[in-house]
Each structure stands twice: as structure tokens, then as C-alpha cells.
Amino acid sequence: MLQPWPGPVRCGVGVSDVSGADRVEKVVLGDGTELDVDLVVVGIGSRPATGWLEGSGIEVDNGVVCDTHGRASAPHVWAIGDVASWRHTLGHQVRVEHWSNVADQARALVPAMLGQDAPESVTVPYFWSDQYDVKIQCLGEPEATDIVHVVEDDGRKFLAFYKRDGVVAGVVGGGMPGKVMKVRSKIAAGAPIVGLFGPTEWWRNGSPRAEDVCVERTDIDCRVDCHRRTCSKWICMDITPETVFEAVRARLARETAANSRAATSKILR
């Protein structure tokens, strides 16, 4: 993705040493390579500064532990922003270091503080990085053990879904901001990843896994014509690309016929 731009990109190697006299002059990589530099940008994340809360009675665990509206464990104490670990509606705690998360939390916290009905804030971690003219975005909580489905990739721009336990856990995209942001509500709802794919995209992403096979249908693509609309499976057993094509063609034929009947009925009226 960065090849058209000047400067080498080194992946899969760490930094073992940074040295210099009055300022940084050299970086030594984990493979022994030495680089002459005059500027180093370090991205190392952060840790919530909660040491001053020790002995206060406020529960702390990777931030101030809060419920779905920002209430801490002590009465009349609320927390919001980077330091706050809010309970997700799915039951786990989430702490997000991003400014847009504060706005989402405020919409739930302020009404709750005032004793009003407040919506639960569904935290969907989000960040982006502008790499020259390509914006890289990540939504959700992708993990190394997730099943990754790259649904679009032209060598420069890409879109990938992360599946965990049958649902979409995250999305990562480069140069596709609109398509990435459309998945936010799906991640927040814990929606089955099945609804994010077109009928032929599965075949561009490798062979099916055992847990993704529907054993109840053997003749047609379940995402196209199966009555089990909420099925979390990806495909039916023994399905082939030709079967998918036939299913799509049959569906389009039915829709065309239905639209034609509706148009005729309207004209007659």
C-alpha cells in the first residue's frame, strides 16, 4: 500500500535500541539493522492513571470500572473518557482511548446523572490512521484468533471482516471509510456476520470451515433463499458456485416477476 511513496517500510521487526548524544541519532532493529535517524515517533499506547484512587473504595481494573451509564462502584461517582472502563451491553468491560467515544458516553451519562431515562451506550472501539492518501480504519475489537475475511482488496484499498463465534467482531479497511462505518451498528448489535456478504464473496475467501456449514440445507445458498433468515451459518453443505449463481438468478427472476405484477396492477388502477 505504501510502495508508491518514498521511504522503506519494514514489517515484522522490532526496535532493540535507540541511541544518540544530545538527540536521537541511531535506531537498531531487532534483526541488527542500524538506521541513521533524526526523528523517532513512538506509538506505545497508554495506561490509565488511577493510582491516586487507591484506598478510595472505587473499583479500578484497567481504568475506573463503570456500568453501562458511567456509574462507578462508589455512590455519586461517575467516570467518562479514556480512564473509564464501561460495561458493554454484552457483559464485558471496555475502555476506549478515542475522543469520539467520549461523545457517545456523554449521551448516556448526562441523562442518567439527571435521573432521566438514558439509552445504554454501546461502545464500539474505533481508530484511524491516515497513511498518505489512504485512511486506515478499525472498528470493534479484532483479535489474532478471529477468522478474517478479506472481501475487497485491489492491492491498495481493502476491506476485511473479523468473525468470532459467528458474529462480526470487527472491521478493518483502507481507503474505504464509508463501507467501514456502515458496519458499526452491526458490531454494536453483535449481528451474525452472514448478513455482510454478497452471495459469491465467500468463494473469494477460501474453503468453508466445519463450523460454518449448515447441515439442514444441502441444495441452495442459505444467504440467498433459506427460510432461516437468522441462521448464523455461512453456507449449506455441498454448495458450489454454480448453485449460488442459480439461486441468485432464481431470486432475481421472482423479484422481477413480482415487480412486473405490481407495476401492471398500478397501471390497471
Image (tube, grey):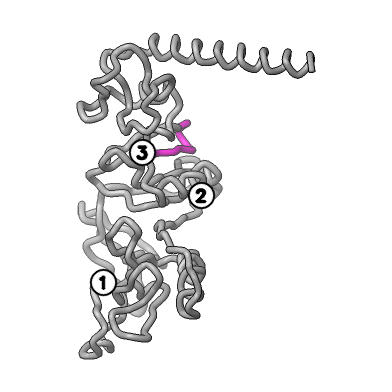
Q: Is residue 40 at least partly visible in the picture?
A: no
Looking at the rendered structure, the secondary structure element under dot 3 is loop
Q: Residue at x 30, y 63 (%)?
A: 27
> Viewed as shown, does residue 17 lie left or right of 117?
left
> Viewed as shown, does residue 166 lie left or right of 38?
left
Q: Is residue 60 at least partly visible in the picture?
A: yes
Q: Nearer the observer, disc 2 or disc 1?
A: 1
Near mark 1 (Cα within 10 A), the count class, few <14, some 14-19 or many ≥20, is some
Q: Picture quarter containing residue 125? A: bottom left
Q: In this figure, which residue is indicated by the disc labeled 3?
A: 192
Please report whichever mark, 2 or 1, sits nearer to the chain's N-terminal start. 1
* Relative depth, front residue between 5 and 255: 255
Looking at the rendered structure, the secondary structure element under dot 1 is loop
> Viewed as shown, does residue 69 lie left or right of 132?
left
> Viewed as shown, does residue 128 lie left or right of 24?
right
**Badge 3 amino acid:** Pro
Q: In this figure, which residue is indicated by the disc labeled 1?
A: 62
Q: From which residue to which does the magenta span run?
A: 153-161
Q: In this figure, which residue is indicated by the disc labeled 2?
A: 135
